[in-house]
Amino acid sequence: ANELKLDGATCVDTGIQLLKSGISDAWTVVADVTFSDTTANQTMICCMQEDGFMGFKLKYSGGASVQWGTTSYNSNSTTNREIMVIRHEAGSRNVTVYSSKAYENSIDTQTLTKSIDTQSDSTLVLGANKTDAGVINDYAKGTIHSCRIWYGDLGDTDCRKIVGWSRETYLFEVGGF
């Protein structure tokens, strides 16, 4: 997705079943998002079963927040633009979340742990939460500037580079006319 404007009433079901093979597959999701409203639980990206144990979602909870099963990470970014990476290593029950913390001077990472394997037929939905029965709720207001999926583990170094790109320093020279 690129520059997907979310009005709090629409969403996109991608049909992608990212967790169908369980923990055996590695994957990485990169999301560049801005919430324009501070309503709790509005969901930008969701690939989670209704019971909340299987899958993940990127939702608003005082800022961009990633829920993995029953554990979560909160960037506390309120309505600031936020780049977040959710990284799953093959065979792991856990995910690592990387946050740009664009309103601070450093990036942040946190591993979200689970004690059970994750496997789900849930599809990846942009802009809302989708229940197992197909009911859509918790629509988001804001923008998904970019959302990318890699069917593989990008590794710690590349994930840090992705969320830290806005802090890169470039030198430019200006010539006279």
Image (cartoon, rainbow, N blue to C red):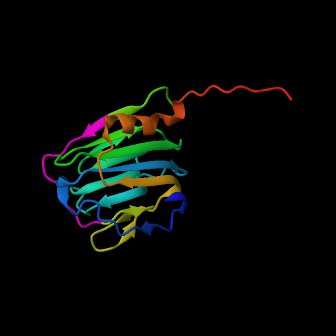
Q: Above or below — where is 41 with respect to 163?
A: below
Q: Which percent across, then down, holds residue 9? A: 50, 67
Residue at the extreme right of the image, as rendered: 177
Identified at 39% across, 35% down, the residue is 160
Is residue 34 one of those drawn in magenta? no
Please give the count of numbered marks on the rendered protein: 0
Q: Which percent across, then down, holds residue 151? A: 31, 55
Q: Look at the image and tell me whether residue 118 can be seen.
A: no
Identified at 22% across, 57% down, the residue is 54
Identified at 35% across, 47% down, the residue is 66
Q: Which percent across, then down, holds residue 85? A: 38, 44
Quadrant of image for the C terminus: top right
Identified at 22% across, 61% down, the residue is 51
Tell me: 30 left or right of 131.
right
Q: Which percent across, then down, holds residue 48? A: 28, 60
Tell me: 18 left or right of 176.
left
Q: Look at the image and tell me whether residue 173 can be seen.
A: yes
Q: Nearer the viewer, residue 159 or 126?
A: 159
Q: Which residues are magenta?
A: 110-122
Task: Give the prevailing secondary structure in the magenta stretch.
Answer: loop
